[in-house]
Image: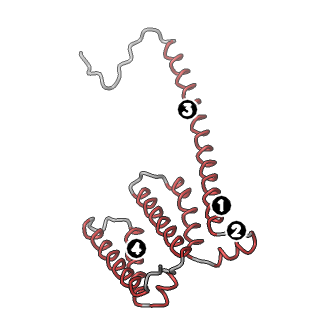
Amino acid sequence: MTVPVQVLRIVACAAGVGALVWGVRIAVKRRLAASFVTLSFLFAAGAALIACAFSGRLVEAVLHPSQMGRIRMGVAAVGVFALLTTFEAIRHTKLKEKYALLWIFPLLAVLVLTIFTAPMRFIRGHFGMEYASIMTAVVFVSLMSAVFVLAKNLSKVERDISTLTQEVALLNAEIGKFGNLEIKSPEEPNNR
């Protein structure tokens, strides 16, 4: 069952207007403190969807009614959502930039492979892989890269903790040499 192009155009226009309204609402509500990336994406997505609504060829190219077209659009939507979530996590300092790159690069690769068909045709022609296999390979390589970087950082943190533990033990031994001297912490009031 294929969806008529007119319905797709109406849905694209409504989604575009919704994205523009949502972007304006966020900008006004947060007094322009919203992420520039988020607002830019919302305005660009709204404008692109409205453009799709008014161009019949563009809507057919973007919202191809085949099953693979719907899968590609779903993957692209999830990728864009994950990318926006990553940028918002960076903006709210919940995610450091060096770890965010572990998400941004794979998401951009997935988006490029989803939106543009030329790299997919190239990979399919040279390696004989289909869309699902290519996406699985991209996700696998991305996850292995992330695991490697995180394992490397975890090893460094463990070495640092070991070094700090040794230094604290040496400082405690040095303090023990002074005998029963009372060391007042800065929080204790002076009772004199």
Residue picked out by circle 2? 129
Mark 4 vs 2, N-terminal side: 4
Residue picked out by circle 1? 137
Residue picked out by circle 4? 40
- Secondary element at image label 4: helix
Q: Specify few, some or many for label 3: CA neighbours under 10 Å numbering under 14, 14-19, or 20 or more.
A: few
- The three-letter amino acid code for the residue at tag 1 is Ala
Instruction: Estimate the spatial distance between the alpha carbons at disc 4 and disc 1, rounded to whole Å.
Output: 30 Å
Q: Residue furthest front?
A: 1
Q: Are marks 2 and 1 in contact (CB under 8 Å)?
A: yes
Question: Residue 24: image x %, image y %?
Answer: 29, 74
Foreground label between 2 and 1: 2
Q: Residue at x 52, y 67 (%)?
A: 75
Circle number at residue 48: none
Q: Name the colouring of the figure.
A: secondary structure
Q: Is residue 185 left or right of residue 61?
A: left
- The three-letter amino acid code for the residue at tag 4 is Ser
Instruction: Estimate the spatial distance between the alpha carbons at disc 3 and disc 2, rounded to whole Å.
Output: 45 Å
- Secondary element at image label 2: loop
Question: Residue 97: image x %, image y %?
Answer: 50, 56
Foreground label between 4 and 1: 1
Q: Residue at x 41, y 82 (%)?
A: 8
